[in-house]
Image (spheres, rainbow, N blue to C red):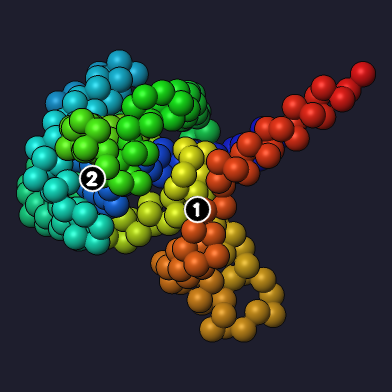
Amino acid sequence: MLQFFDSYGFLIVSMFLGALLGLSVYLPLMAGQLSLASPGFYAIGGYIAAIISTQVFPAERFSIWVLLAEIGLAAIACGILAIFLGLPVLRLRGIYLAISTIAFVEILRVFALNLEITGGAVGIFGIPQPFKTQIAYLWIVLPLLCLCMALLYRIEVTELGRIWRGIREDELAAGTMGINSTYYKVLAFSLGGMLAGIAGVISAHFLNTWNARQGTFDASIIYLAFVLAGGSRTFVGPVVGGMILTALPEVLRAIAGINGLPKWLSQFFQDGRLIIFGILIVVTTIYFPKGLITPELLKTLGKSIRTRVLAKP
């Protein structure tokens, strides 16, 4: 068992980070906002961690307390930026909102490529790692994911969750009932940005390097696939989708390595991840419009589990 965790520690932690990034897209989607800005906030969080841990604090002075300070600073910075960005941008809807948030991601990428403090196209290397092994990052990633899931579960059954669902279903009707839709949409957008920024801080230390490739349009499509494939009507969907689709490239590489597979097919499985993600988005949108995990499915599973537990002597 220990050998398994040592061998697949990187993949396991990456799956949980993928679940966090899926939740960062799901939060504004709860209020009906198709935002693709998560990679931008993710990149900002990573750069904050990289700059502080390499240029402010020497490696020998780095500690877990510095990491926690970076997480707090990234959450505050991404939250404030999300408010300033969300106030004008969230007046748009649908595909226009998606395009504007993609523009935000691309603007940040261009800045990262041309600023000296971000290391330009090369990026920042030698970011200190607070844990000796990759699997040890679960000590911070797993509690964070559980906390986010607990908060989202609580939000979904409270007034805030009902307000977000009301705005998602019919913003005009919600406005006639006295709901300030702009406030609640910006709140959801800001929380999603903060979560992506926190994930970026952890990822920067986990990967030991950070560059402009961490926040791109490709990443926007991948994070959106996490939500659409997993399910956009319950927080469990993005968690499941993020974990499965993060592990999918490794599965595809394993398939590509099968002996006797045609060379063109092996190359497709190895390099066609974005194509496969696009196909998954189209297929799930057509045949599973609510995703693989739906509230109805969770209720059915809950009833089945309760029935089996109560049936035991």
Left or right, residue 244 beside residue 311: left
Marks 1/2: CA distance? Answer: 23 Å
What amino acid is found at the position of numbered circle 1 in the picture? Lys
Q: Position of residue 277 (x, y in %)?
A: 45, 64
Residue sitting nearer the eye, 203 or 35: 35
Q: Residue at x 46, y 68 (%)?
A: 282
Q: Residue at x 56, y 47 (%)?
A: 293
The C terminus - image quarter: top right
* Residue 195: numbered disc: none
Left or right, residue 114 beside residue 269: left
Q: Residue at x 62, y 84 (%)?
A: 262
Q: Quadrant of residue 21?
A: top left
What amino acid is found at the position of numbered circle 2 in the picture? Leu
* Residue 290: numbered disc: 1
Residue sitting nearer the eye, 8 or 187: 187
Left or right, residue 313 beside residue 286: right
Q: Earlier in the sequence, mark 1 or mark 2?
A: 2
Q: Quadrant of residue 25?
A: top left
- Compared with 136, 93 (above or below) is below
- Please state the total of marks drawn on the protein image: 2
Residue 99 can be seen, yes or no: yes
- Compared with 297, 273 (above or below) is below
Q: Position of residue 121 (x, y in %)?
A: 17, 56
Mark 1, secondary structure of its residue: loop
Residue, disc 2 = 172
